[in-house]
Amino acid sequence: MNGPADGGPPPNLDRERLLHHLDTMWRIRAFEEAALRGLADGHVRGAIHPSIGQEAVATAVCLNLARADLLLSTHRGHGHTLAKGADAQAMMRELFGREGGTCGGKGGSMHIADFSVGMLGANGVVSANIPIAVGAAHAIRLRGGTEIVACLFGDGAINRGPFLEGLNWAKIFHLPVLFVCEDNGWSATTRTADLTAGEGAAARAQSLGIPAQILDGNDALALDEAARAAIDDVRAGEGPRLLHVRTYRITGHTAADAAPYRDAAEVEAWRGRDPIRRLADALAHAGVDAARLEEARTRAEAEMADVLANAAAAPWPAPEAAYADVQDIGDPAVRAF
Amino acid sequence: MAITTYLAASTRALAEEMERDPAVWALGEDLGRGGVFGQYKGLQQRFGAARIADTPISEACIMGAAVGAALAGTRPVVEMRFSDFALCATDELINQAAKARFMFGGQAKVPLVARQPVGMWRSSAAQHSQSLEAWYAHVPGLVVVAPGTPADNLGLLKSAIRADDPVVYLEHKDLWAAEGEVPDAEHLVPIGVADTAREGRDLTIVTWSGMRRRCLEAAGTLAAEGIEAEVIDLRTLWPWDRDRVLASVERTRRLLVVHEAVTVAGFGAEIAAFVAEHLHARLAAPVRRLGAPRIPVAYAPPLEDMARVSPEAIVAAARATTAPAAAIAS
Ligand SMILES: Cc1ncc(C[n+]2csc(CCOP(=O)(O)OP(=O)(O)O)c2C)c(N)n1
């Protein structure tokens, strides 16, 4: 539903804004495809969890946030982080474990954070970012700030206790948090539906009195509208909101997972709903030039090819960095005798 | 100087730090009514419900929210009610609070204090009596503090609140009513510095928290027998005052470590090993540890007592360490 299929009048789209979304989605896709090449070349050292196919969630949520707003992400967070404004070069270096990485090579893909853009961390522990997000919102409240916090998590995360504790907390303290459940249908290699009682994230949020909506996560236009409205509500002091966004990851759980447990037809069906293509089609229908749409992709691919090459040329961190930033009090070094 | 309780000292510490720094706030269950032991009494009336926050019974979220609030620029003081319940917040403390600064390459610190009342009380049984300080001392990123006197509870809690690291702050439940002299003026005790509670030449007893009192009592008995024990209260378990302990054992040539926690893999093992590594040749007797047997704490008083380190047991261990037969043949 990205435009009338019957060739009716083009929808009245905010083209500049949506081109920015498209550019960002391509940058995310190109970043992760480059990271997969980096993994194949042995440069990316640890596990990565690609979000290919889920890019519209990252852009709809994060591009509607202000820079000062805070973001808590997950193990599948490259897209969120890029869309929040983190530097792609520093991110790729982080995946490579190199100097100049967002975390100096100490965190890797699952612990990317960029406090300069309000990105307070991916997380290696499913659901753990939820209490952290509500605490960040609590701090904003105490300071009298106007920022809000966005917290993204997977459908698997709603079966851990911190989901309940965090949503309850956000509601009773009436905190400015936008929760986004990025429901790709899978908890690692098991179907989430087989593990989840009831109707899932939106229903659970509603049971706590948190307004929630179920959305098509591959429809960038509708998602952008919904995210913007929810963020406006949260910013207006109306308390927490939850978006339950249905999408799909095209790759396996990690880059190393060939996902043999999935039906090929299921994957193909979701490929057909590619969120980037759907947005590009909508923009084409609205009269955006094909060359500009193509440029969105080629520019992103060129950028990430450079990012990849530069990361590969970056030095390793100095070994002594392993002793830095442990804690202020007490000597972290085990004394040698 | 005034005589005050360990409990009142902690209330004063938090009040002074909240007065001094608007970024300091406390969160936990039932704080508005003073906290489960009364250590927050009057604070919500004074500072308001936003800064003395009553939370749901959601230990994971209390600790996790404190991590987020610390990353976002405030200085939360977390109340865990009983250290046993802090186990519900293990991920938040160990994987999140202790690691965030390092994992994020130093982009942010996590200045939170996790107050966890520890130790045996009266018939509190296995889920309200534990001393798990060794677990925390094992975790890079955490500071571990265990005050044993009212003055130290004042001065160390203030230092913990001012520290930029996550501090596990272990107050002993059996000490709440303990009285002691506390300075009227601003009182800060540096983290990582031990207190020599009693000087002595014959052996060094290293202890902390609730066992400080028991060791001093034992030292009195030993003195009547002509054994002069030096009692060192570590006060902080990470970092612990290795220099103070080494200097003392260098002189006394004998070491006894006493703690309330289970002996096996307790923090006494770290101290004993460290001293043995450094002073093996100086030691006149094997280092000795005294702690609880490896049993859960029971409810019935006679059973509970089986897990309790008594002054008599400390005296016996000290006698054994100082007896000529204990000497290492050279
Ligand atoms: C507490 C915890 N349990 C298990 C894991 C291992 N694990 C990593 S990702 C994942 C699946 C999470 O599924 P979901 O939350 O739906 O996110 P998705 O991977 O689909 O993005 C699991 C089980 C973990 N990281 N943390």
Image: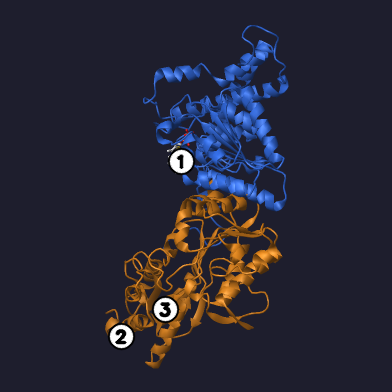
Chain colours: A blue, B orange
Q: CA distance from mark 3 to mark 2?
A: 15 Å
The C terminus of chain B, quarter of image = bottom left
Q: Which mark is residue B323?
A: 2
Is residue A314 in view from this perspective?
no
Which residue is under mark 3? Answer: B205
Quadrant of the picture in which ligand 1 is shown? top left
Q: Percent x, y for residue A127?
A: 50, 42
Q: Residue at x 62, y 26 (%)?
A: A223
Q: Residue B129 sits in which quadrant?
A: bottom left
Q: Earlier in the sequence, mark 3 or mark 2?
A: 3
Q: Residue flagged by tag 2: what amino acid is it?
A: Ala
Q: Percent x, y for residue B5?
A: 57, 78
Q: Chain of mark 3?
A: B
- Which tag is nearer the camera, tag 3 or tag 1? 1
User: What secondary structure is found at the residue carrying circle 2?
Assistant: loop
User: What secondary structure is found at the residue carrying circle 1?
Assistant: helix
**Label 2 environment density (alpha carbons within 10 Å; few <14, some 14–19, many ≥20):** few
Which residue is under mark 1? Answer: A159
Marks 1 and 2 in Cβ contact (< 8 Å): no
User: Do badges 3 and 2 share one subunit?
Assistant: yes
Q: Chain of mark 1?
A: A
